[in-house]
Amino acid sequence: MERTERQRRNHPLNRSLAPSESAGSSSSPSRRTFSNRSRNSDYKHSKYNTNSNRSFEGDSDWRSRRSSDNKVYVQKLETKEDDGGHADRSHFDLPPVIVGTCPFMCPEAERAQRERLKDLAIFERLHGNPGKTSPGLAVKKFCRTMSAKSDQALDVRPLPVLEITLKYVLSFLDSKEQPFEVIHDFVFDRTRSIRQDLSVQNIVNEKAIYMYEEMVKFHVISHQKLLNDDSISNASSMHHLNMQQLSKALITLLNLYEVNRRNGAIFENEAEFHSFYVLLHLGSNSQATGESLTLWFRTLRSPVIKSKEMCFARTILRYFRMCNYKGFLCTVGAEASNLQYCVLEPYINEIRALALFFINNGGYKLNPYPLVDLSVLLMMEESEVESFCKACGLAICEDELGNFSLPTKQTTFSSPRVFQRYSFLKQ
């Protein structure tokens, strides 16, 4: 009888939870599992989520709340279980926010340490001395281990200082004293540190939007320059890292637009930056390959989707996927903004090579294609067409009048993996 009663009491359906295992305990398996899953989700609920990039430079799920001093702070969702043990995501709690107090572009402790270690960029050196700097020259470096829990307010720069720092750092892009590789390394690291300080303080107001727009512009311009500068030895790796940070900064910016949305209106530059997200989906090596663009388009507001910038981006995407080289080149030449062209330039020669492939295979063998007409179609200088054809493995012939043309049906065509830089004649 005792054994039977003991078995009945120990049955899973009749056994009660010990106090340490109750649903209200913070160490319960269900709550612990959800917490870990939430921390590792990398903002998976964001409509701008990508598989490899994090938005908001930080944690998983975010909302905004406006404070009395007109600042916007981002909120994390805190899980709370109901009586049935199910996670309830309707409970909000403002996370601990660190408020920076550092008055300089670089904290004093870091500046002193870097002087001691002679870890100063060329732009930070006082009179060229690698072991000496000043508050007006040194800029805080990016630190991977920085967090709101471990860092102190004196090591974090407040928003006004971050604005001044960003303006100072971006001013080096106009410098001609150093090669672009050196300038890019410096601006790349220091803007990443600025984004980190914004994230740690949960600053997501309209000033943060402006700052992110400027930083995304830097990465877009670098996207073009790193591909066109043959003097850079490690351009490939630098371009890869730049694309990673471009995707991260852009996704954060698009989410900031949503956080600061008022009355359905859109920001002045919002449509153009949304178009970048679309244009980065061109090609098989795209880094911004998250959810399907078809689903993403459905989440956009009508003023954005109907804007000329987004209409242009969608048209370009359609022409690219349909291999419509003439429509692609003509549309880029007629409608692309300077920043949109920076994103698209790597695909221009790819589309030109596709055009040569179709002309070579579809042309009539007895009628060579004149280079004059080919230069108009490819929107490039006639003097460069011959070089481009030879780069694609195609020979050029000359008639008795001295006119050059492209014989078709050649079997030697091959699209080069790397193109030299050619001109683009906009309409």
Image (spheres, rainbow, N blue to C red):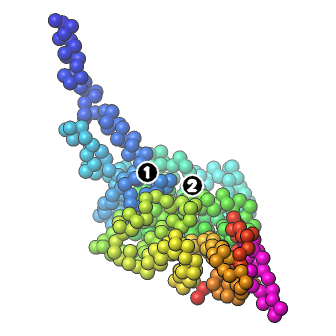
Residue for point 61% across, 59% down: 240
Which label lies toward us, 1 or 2? 1
Mark 2 secondary-structure assignment: loop
Q: Which numbered marker is on residue 165?
A: none
Residue at the far top: name it.
Answer: 1
Question: Which residue carries the number 2 mark?
Answer: 142
**Residue 91, placed above or below residue 223:** above
Examine the image and state in which quarter residue 308 appears: bottom left
Image coordinates for residue 259, horizontal then vertical, percent: 35, 64
Q: CA distance from mark 1 to mark 2?
A: 20 Å
Q: Is residue 41 visible?
A: yes
| Amino acid marked by disc 1 | Asp
**Residue 188, placed above or below residue 349:** above
Q: Residues within 10 Å of mark 1 (few under 14, many from 20)?
A: many
**Residue 14, placed above or below residue 423:** above
Q: Going by the image, does 395 lie left or right of 306? A: right
Q: Are the two marked residues, 1 and 2, in contact with CB atoms closer than 8 angstroms?
A: no
The C terminus lies in quadrant: bottom right
Question: Which residue carries the number 1 mark?
Answer: 42
Image coordinates for residue 342, horizontal then vertical, percent: 58, 74
In front of the other: 390 or 20: 390
Mark toward the start of the polypeptide (1 vs 2)? 1
Q: Going by the image, does 342 lie left or right of 276? A: right
Determine if the magenta segment contains residue 231: no
Determine if the magenta segment contains residue 386: yes
Image coordinates for residue 424, horizontal then vertical, percent: 64, 81
Q: Residues within 10 Å of mark 2 (few under 14, many from 20)?
A: some
Q: Is residue 269 visible?
A: no
| Amino acid marked by disc 2 | Phe
Q: Which residues are magenta?
A: 384-407
Residue for point 65% across, 87% down: 376
Image coordinates for residue 323, horizontal then vertical, percent: 55, 73
